[in-house]
Amino acid sequence: MRALSCPTQSYDWGSTHAIPGFQRQDADGSRVAEVWIGTHPLGTARVVQPSGDEQPLTEVAGELDFMLKVLAAERPLSIQVHPDAARAAAGFAAEEDAGIPLDSPARVFKDPHPKPEMVYALSTFDTLVGLRRTSEIMRVLQALEHPLADQLMSSLTVHSGFNGIIRLIEGLLAEPPAPDTVGEVVTACEKALDAGRDVRRAFETAVEIAEHCPGDVGVIISLLLNRLTLQPGEAAYLATGIIHAHLKGLCLEVMVSSDNVLRAGLTTKHIDAQGLVQCLEEGTSRAARVEPRVFNYSTDVFAPCDDFALSVTQSSPADPAGVVLPASGTRLLVCTGGEVALVNRRDEVLRLHRGDVAFADESDGELRVGGTGEIAQAFVPGTDERGQLFDLL
C-alpha cells in the first residue's frame, strides 16, 4: 500500500472551498475543480515514500486503465458528451497526424480511449443527463409562449423522437440564437416559475444556468435535458454517447483513464458542435441509476460496466477485526470521511484521514479497513460482478 499525492485541476466552474475542505486544507480563494487519481499523462499521481520523496505512480503501477476523481462544481460544467472507443481512437489518430499539440486549446482527443464514467455523490449533486421525451419537451416549449419555442415545436412536430431532438440540438449549435433571444426565453421561464408552473424543473434549471452563462445557447439546450439530483451515497452511470452537464455539488467520478470531452455550450473551452452531435447515440438518451450490490454488511459495490467499479465501505469500532474490502488487484482508494486504517495481507498498516488517497496492488492481497470512517475504492470488477441499472427517472 502506498500513499499518493495527486494533482488538482483549476477550472472556472470549480469550487473555492469544497475540495480544500475535503482535503482538510485552508482555501486560498482559487477555484479547485478536480483531483486526479491515476496515471493519465495530463495529471499523474505520485507515490509518497516513507522518506517523503515522491515518484510517478506509473513507475510503480504502469499505465492504469481506470482512474478516480474528486469533482467539485460551484457552477455548471459544459454541455458535453464522451466518445466511444472507435470515435476516440479515430479522433486521436487524426489530431496526432495533424500535429495538434496535446496541450492545445483546440485539441479535442487527448488520448485514444473512450470515457464512460460513473458519478457517486458526496453531497447533494445536481446534473443534467440525457434527453427528455419528445412529449415532455413539447410541454416545456408550449408553456414558454415564445417565438423560438414555437419554432422548435414546429421542428419536433415534423421530426419527432430521438432523431428529431438531435436535429434541434444540431440546429441550435449551427445557428445559435442571439443572446437577447436567450434572455427573453429565460424571462419566460421566470414568469412560469412565478406562476407556480414548471415541467420537471426545466424552467428552474434554465434560470439557474442563465445566472452563470447569460445569453448562452446552452441555456436553451438545457430545456431538452433531464434534471437529476443525487443524494449522498447515490450513483449514476454515464455511458459514452450520452449528453450531460453537471450543475453543482461534490462527487467522486470513476472512469476509463481518458480526458476526451466534446463540448457544446456553457464553456469558455474549445467547442466541437459537429463532433458532439455525431457522438450522440440512440438508446443512451437517458442515464441509469446504479443499484449497489451488497458485498458485506458495511460495503456497497457500484459496478455499472466491465471497465470499473466503486466500493464504499464504512468502518467503526463495532468491527474490531476490520471490514474486508472487495477485490485484490490494482486499487485506488480515497478516504471520504473520518479516519481509517488499511491493513494488507502482510499486516502492514496505512492510516488515512478524510481526503487522503492510496494505491494498492496484487501484492497487498485482501485489504481490511478499521477505524471510524468511510473509504471508497475504485477497481476493475470481475465479469460476473456487474450490478443492476435503473432508469434515472
Image (tube, rainbow, N blue to C red):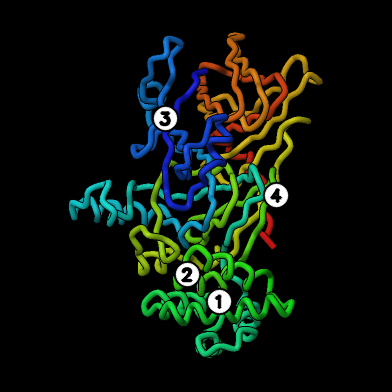
**Mark 4 against mark 2, which lies toward the viewer?**
2
Mark 4 residue type: Gln
Q: Classify mark 1: helix, strand or loop.
A: helix
Amino acid tagged 1: Val
Q: Which mark is residue 231?
A: 4
Tell us which disc is closer to us: 1 or 4: 1
Q: Residue at 46% of width from left, 45% of height from top?
A: 31
Mark 3 or 2, closer to the camera? 2
Q: Earlier in the sequence, mark 3 or mark 4?
A: 3
Alpha-carbon span between mark 4 and mark 2:
28 Å
* Residue at x-position 48% and y-position 75%: 166
The residues bearing labels 1 and 2 have C-alpha atoms spaced at a distance of 9 Å
Q: Earlier in the sequence, mark 1 or mark 4?
A: 1
Give how far across and how far down residue 188 sits, in percent. 59, 81
Per the image, the residue denoted by label 2 is 214
The mark tally for this picture is: 4
Q: Name the residue beneath numbered marker 3.
A: 45
Mark 1 to mark 4 CA distance (whole Å) = 27 Å
Q: Are marks 1 and 3 in contact (CB under 8 Å)?
A: no
Q: Earlier in the sequence, mark 1 or mark 3?
A: 3
- Give the labeled residue for mark 1: 186
User: Real-space Cα distance between discs 1 and 3?
Assistant: 42 Å
Tell me the element at label 2. loop
Contact between marks 4 and 2 (CB within 8 A): the answer is: no
Q: Earlier in the sequence, mark 3 or mark 2?
A: 3
Report the amino acid beneath label 2. Answer: Pro
